Image: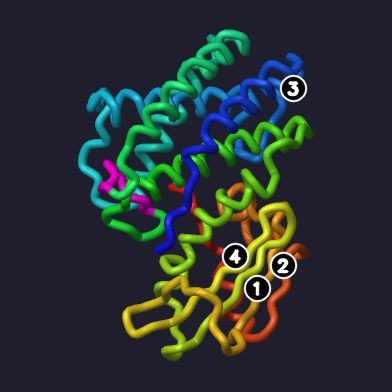
Amino acid sequence: MNVIETIHLFPVLDQKLIELLRSLTPEEWNRPTVAKLWTVKDVASHILDTHLRTLSIARDGYFGDPPGNIQSSQDLIDYLNRVNADWVASCKRLSPAVLTDLLEEYCARASAYMATLDPTASALFSVGWAGEAVSANWFHIAREYTEKWHHQQQIRDAVNKPGIMTAELYHPFLDTFMRALPFTYRDTPASEGTFLQFTLTGEGRGDWYLMKKAAGWELVQKPDSSPAAHTTIDGSIAWKLFSKSWRRQDVLRYVSIEGDQQLGDVVLDMVSVMA
């Protein structure tokens, strides 16, 4: 698996987030987002939580609210949903100004800590949505980059203030999310040697290729043969689909599939977050 370099982009996203939040009106802070029941302020509160937990758990080794007996991925999702909801409810008492000040300080601290990690060492937490039991730190860092990017984009989407859907910032996000393809297709039958092409259009544009091998589906470089299916998705909505803000019924008009419709359609159920 090719390494995705993202750590140099953390300070860029941090700066853009603070500039965005300081530009918001009181009405914009209370706007709903695609994150279901969360407002702009709730999403900002969640971003703060992820950075504080990074410092507390990963840097300091402090597990103040351990998950307990996790027997399945659903158990982990239920735990994460609970702690996320608890934090957002507690932050209702914080003003937008206080919240922004805290984000300015702790986004930078968390990003600086992430930059100290050995990219090739094993991460404290694996990237579960990619089906990995153990992940390298570079993949963990890229996963954290996607969290930073898509929560900020949820805010920008709600207040109609674009700024991070650029080739520099959006393509690494999509490239990381597409690492969930082999796990998504793990139960999809096909003859060995079958390959699929996925194209995302727009600023984060790119092509990804998935091949069925003896051991299962793998991401590969572009093969010389023609794909059994070629799925094209409008990149402007891809972030909503793969973060589970939108589902397949919401995106069908943004998708085209050439070739085997059943094989090309499976990607619409891909989720590259723990949700």
The disc, 3 or 1, on the residue closer to the chain's N-terminal end is: 3
- Which mark, residue 255? 2
Q: Position of residue 181 (x, y in %)?
A: 48, 66
Residue that carries the numbered disc 3 in the rendered image: 28
The disc, 4 or 3, on the residue closer to the chain's N-terminal end is: 3
- The residue located at (65%, 38%) in the rendering is 153
- The residue located at (58%, 54%) in the rendering is 174
**Cβ atoms under marks 1 and 4 closer than 8 Å:** no
- Which mark, residue 268? 4
Mark 4, other Cα within 10 Å: few <14 / some 14–19 / many ≥20: some
- The residue located at (30%, 44%) in the rendering is 125
Which of labels 1 and 4 is toward the front? 1
* SS at circle 4: helix
* SS at circle 1: strand
Q: CA distance from mark 4 to mark 3?
A: 31 Å
Q: Which contiguous range is marked in magenta? A: 121-128
**Cβ atoms under marks 2 and 1 closer than 8 Å:** yes
- Disc 4 marks a residue whose amino acid type is Leu
Q: Is residue 75 visible?
A: no
